[in-house]
Amino acid sequence: MSRKTILILATLLALPMLCAAQNPPTPPPPPAAKEAPPVVIGPAKVAFMNIQLAIANCDEGKKESSMLNGYVDSKSSELQKMQKTAEALKTQLDVQGSKLTDEARADLADQIESQDTAVQRFQQDTQKDIDGRRQKLQNGIARKMLPVIEKVAKEKGLQVVQFLDVAQIFGYVDPSLVITDDVVKAYNVTYPGAAAAPAVKK
């Protein structure tokens, strides 16, 4: 065999080794990750409360309601005076109408109409005012009560506190699951100064 033939054979034999060195074998794929087991959520511990009742029964709610009732009474007195004035004018027209001149009778009729309109507007404006004051009272206490409800819930190990709505009918709720009184007591401790009654706002 000639020297040239030997060199060619040696070169051909070396090619697979060079290719193997340049292209290392691909490592096997890593084993598939095991899927995490599903999270099991246990039953939640639930309690109920009537927040409207809590607002009305807490010390601050009683104080604010007393103030509002005083305001309502004062407005009722004003309304009664206006209604008496209107009735007096109507009586005057009934009794003296035939004795009055046409001009005086027309003037009295205008006064009655004006007084009736004033009474109606007073009733509407006063009712709107009272409703707004009552809503503001309830919303103000409710905002302060929410953290107290959360605190009571954590102390009792509760996950859910559901409000009892007067418009929602429950067939039966175990009294031991109702925490309204607990929230009221906790609220009174948290806001002890709220029971001091300021002057009635007019």
Image (cartoon, rainbow, N blue to C red):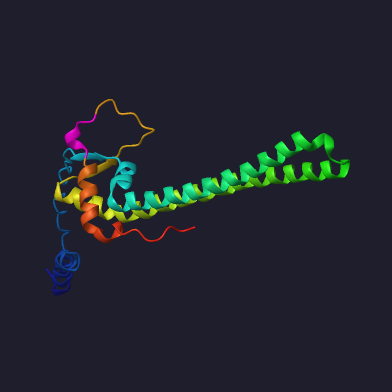
Q: Is residue 160 left or right of residue 9?
A: right
Residue at point 19%, 37% (across, down) = 177
Rendered position, 175 above or below 13? above
- Count the labels in the image: 0
The quadrant in which residue 167 appears is top left
Residue at point 43%, 50% (across, down) = 70
The quadrant in which residue 197 appears is bottom left
Q: Toward the viewer: 148 or 37?
A: 148
Rendered position, 134 above or below 193? above
Give residue 35's position: percent from left, percent from top.
Answer: 17, 46
In what quadrant of the picture does the N terminus appear? bottom left
Q: Toward the viewer: 163 or 60?
A: 60
Q: Is residue 72 left or right of residue 100?
A: left
Numbered range of the magenta stretch: 173-178
Rendered position, 64 above or below 103? below
The verdict on residue 14 being magenta is no
Q: Toward the viewer: 191 or 195?
A: 195
Give residue 58's position: percent from left, percent from top.
Answer: 28, 49
Give residue 89's position: percent from left, percent from top.
Answer: 71, 41
Residue placed farthest to the bottom in the image? 3
Residue at point 21%, 52% (across, down) = 186
Give residue 6's position: percent from left, percent from top.
Answer: 13, 70
Q: Is residue 115 left or right of residue 190?
A: right
